[in-house]
Image (cartoon, coloured by chain):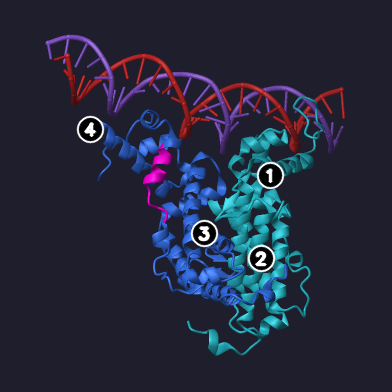
Chain colours: A blue, B cyan, C purple, D red
Amino acid sequence: MDTESHPPHRPRDKAATRKRLIDAVGRVLAQKGFSALGINHVAREAGVDKVLIYRYFGGLAELMDVYGREGDFWPNVDELTQGVESESTPAEAAGRVVANYLSAIRNRPVTLEILAWEVTVRNELTIRLEKTREQTSRELTHRLASLEAFSDARGVDIEAFGALFSSAFTYLLVRSFRGTTVYNGIEIGKPLGWERLERAINRLIVGYFSAFPNASAREKGEES
Amino acid sequence: MDTESHPPHRPRDKAATRKRLIDAVGRVLAQKGFSALGINHVAREAGVDKVLIYRYFGGLAELMDVYGREGDFWPNVDELTQGVESESTPAEAAGRVVANYLSAIRNRPVTLEILAWEVTVRNELTIRLEKTREQTSRELTHRLASLEAFSDARGVDIEAFGALFSSAFTYLLVRSFRGTTVYNGIEIGKPLGWERLERAINRLIVGYFSAFPNASAREKGEES
DNA sequence: TGACAATGTCACCGGACGGTGATATTAAGT
DNA sequence: ACTTAATATCACCGTCCGGTGACATTGTCA
């Protein structure tokens, strides 16, 4: 429909060709996965000679860098904190962020592809993407910590809390995305499985924060 | 030290050559990772011609199958439930299993490599390994559920609980194994980071089970 | 109109991959 | 000792990869 075959003279337009290449990265990632992400594939997908990748970007790494900047596959802080009010309790806020994170990542194949990619290899590309995400999580932590309720909750390690939950979700979502249907007896490929998970998550969140009822109760839980 | 170079005539021994190939798989996985796992690499590592892989096993997939059977890279239920007594409370038992899981997987590069592999691709081999692990987790769940304390705790979903924690650990361990030093502000490459995680984990466990104090308290937490 | 740079195409290189046929070497059976 | 089959090695094929130099086409500006 859109991508023509070779011969018909395309009007020469550097900017358009650049965009063609950037878009091709996303298409290759979505359709073939990162294992097929190479100079040849991207150029072929863009219907353009691969030498232009070197000329316009310097190489695939730099092209990926641009793609990483322009892509919106990662939710920002505003999206993650949607529904979190300043007077929210920690449990409410955490539950909101968790739900936002889940819905933000689900059904975004490219994002899941990249997350899976980060697990397997660690090169210039994934390190750049990783830094972007780390920056986002830093902002998120900062914003959550600025909530009144959190400032009162002693002993709460919001970073460790977030690391555990986001890593669990990321792992389960990626596994499900890759085709695993059952993990630890949970049907992660069906809504029912995720309902069970969300129920357990809610209990964990409530339990975690209820152990620190807005100050006090410090002598009770500090055994280490 | 052990692996000779090419020329010196080795005594002909099919069984020994088979073993050489199987061991080479583990070495390649441990040293180069699954991305380098190919006919050529394995044969080169074994110091043997690659055609023998076809002759003795049929191909790399079948060789991997044999390797998967003979390897002991996955902890069994006994190892995971070490220290869990029949009179343990759910929180104690869960904490024990969590700690055992962590120590069992850490410093096992091949296991971590395989776990990372399962995230990325899904083929005959990873599916087989996945089934083995799923079977183990099923047994583990069954054993834990048979504890008295658990049978009393209503509303506890031990499978969902385990899925969340094991997936979080797996993800963080693999990321750390791959070289990521900071995740969500946690230094997962250093003991300090893991201490923070373990502290948060303990609070989560205690909080999760304390929400269900051995029966009763059912009308309090069943909002969904 | 003519020169020149920008844009895009083509052909090729060396290397690694999976896979296979032919050949050499060794061990065993008679 | 001689045959024979098992064991192991070698050489080669086609394909894809990342990367690069040479060439063709187009637009711009003097």
Quadrant position of residue A224: bottom right
From the viewer's perspective, is residue B19 above or below residue A10?
below
Q: Are marks 4 and 2 in contact (CB under 8 Å)?
A: no
Q: Are marks 1 and 2 in contact (CB under 8 Å)?
A: no
Instruction: Using a 10 Å C-alpha cutoff, classify the residue at mark 3 as few (fewer than 14 neighbours), some (14 to 19) or many (20 or more).
Output: many
Q: Which mark is residue A74?
A: none
Residue closest to the eye, B21 or A16? A16
Comes first in the chain, label 3 or label 4 = 4
Q: Is circle 3 on the same chain as circle 4?
A: yes
Q: Is circle 1 on the same chain as circle 4?
A: no
Q: Nearer the viewer, mark 4 or mark 2?
A: 2
Cα separation, mark 3 vs mark 1, equals 25 Å
Look at the numbered disc 4 and give the secondary structure of its residue: loop
What's drawn in magenta, residue-wise? A63-75
Residue closest to the eye, B98 or A136? A136
Q: Which three-letter amino acid code belongs to the residue tagged 1?
A: Ala
Q: Can residue B122 be seen in this snapshot? A: no
Residue closest to the eye, A20 or A162? A162
Q: Which residue is mark 1?
A: B30
Cα separation, mark 3 vs mark 2, equals 21 Å
Q: Which three-letter amino acid code belongs to the residue tagged 3?
A: Thr
From the viewer's perspective, is residue B15 above or below residue A219?
above
Q: Which residue is mark 4?
A: A10
Cα separation, mark 3 vs mark 4, equals 42 Å
Q: Which three-letter amino acid code belongs to the residue tagged 4?
A: Arg
Query: Magenta segment: does it hold A70?
Result: yes
Q: Which mark is residue A170?
A: 3
Q: Which three-letter amino acid code belongs to the residue tagged 2?
A: Arg
Comes first in the chain, label 1 or label 2 = 1
Residue B166, position in %: x, y? 62, 64
